[in-house]
């Protein structure tokens, strides 16, 4: 039986906090996690952190 996942969920959420990006191709702004963010609107990888 699981004893609860509260502290794990909080810790995981803090580590996976997304960064804000703006797409240079279509201008969309979004949050992403990872080394190679991709625009969810046009799927371009030409993005800049804002």
Image (tube, helix red, strand yellow):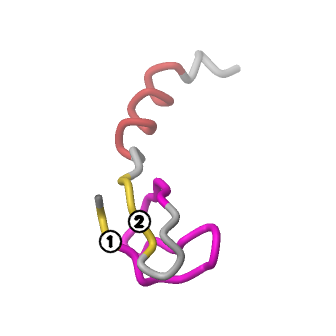
* SS at badge 1: strand
Residue 2 found in image quarter: top right
- Which numbered marker is on residue 48? 1
Q: As displayed, is residue 26 above or below residue 12?
A: below
- Which numbered marker is on residue 29? none
Q: Residue at x 54, y 71 (%)?
A: 39
- Residue 48 left/right relative to 6: left
Rendering coords of residue 34 (x, y %): 41, 65
Q: Residue at x 50, y 30 (%)?
A: 9
Write the start and end of the magenta stretch as one range. Answer: 29-47
Q: Which residue is mark 2?
A: 22
* SS at badge 2: strand
Q: As displayed, is residue 27 above or below residue 8?
A: below
Q: Residue at x 35, y 44 (%)?
A: 15
Residue 37 found in image quarter: bottom left
User: Residue 11 or 48: which is nearer the viewer?
Assistant: 48
Circles 2 and 1: CB atoms closer than 8 Å: yes
Q: Earlier in the sequence, mark 2 or mark 1?
A: 2
Rendering coords of residue 50 (x, y %): 29, 58
Q: Residues within 10 Å of mark 2 (few under 14, many from 20)?
A: some
Q: Main secondary structure of the magenta part?
A: loop
Residue 39 covered by magenta stretch = yes
Task: Identify the residue at the far top of this view.
Answer: 3
Structural distance between the alpha carbons of marks 2 and 1: 5 Å
Rendering coords of residue 26 (x, y %): 53, 76
Residue 42 covered by magenta stretch = yes
Task: Identify the residue at the far right of this view.
Answer: 1
Rendering coords of residue 29 (x, y %): 47, 59
């Amino acid at each position: 039986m699981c004893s609860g996942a509260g502290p794990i969920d909080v810790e995981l959420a803090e580590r996976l906090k997304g960064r804000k990006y703006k797409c240079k191709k279509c201008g969309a702004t979004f949050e992403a996690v990872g080394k190679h963010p991709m625009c969810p609107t046009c799927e371009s990888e030409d993005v800049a952190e804002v």
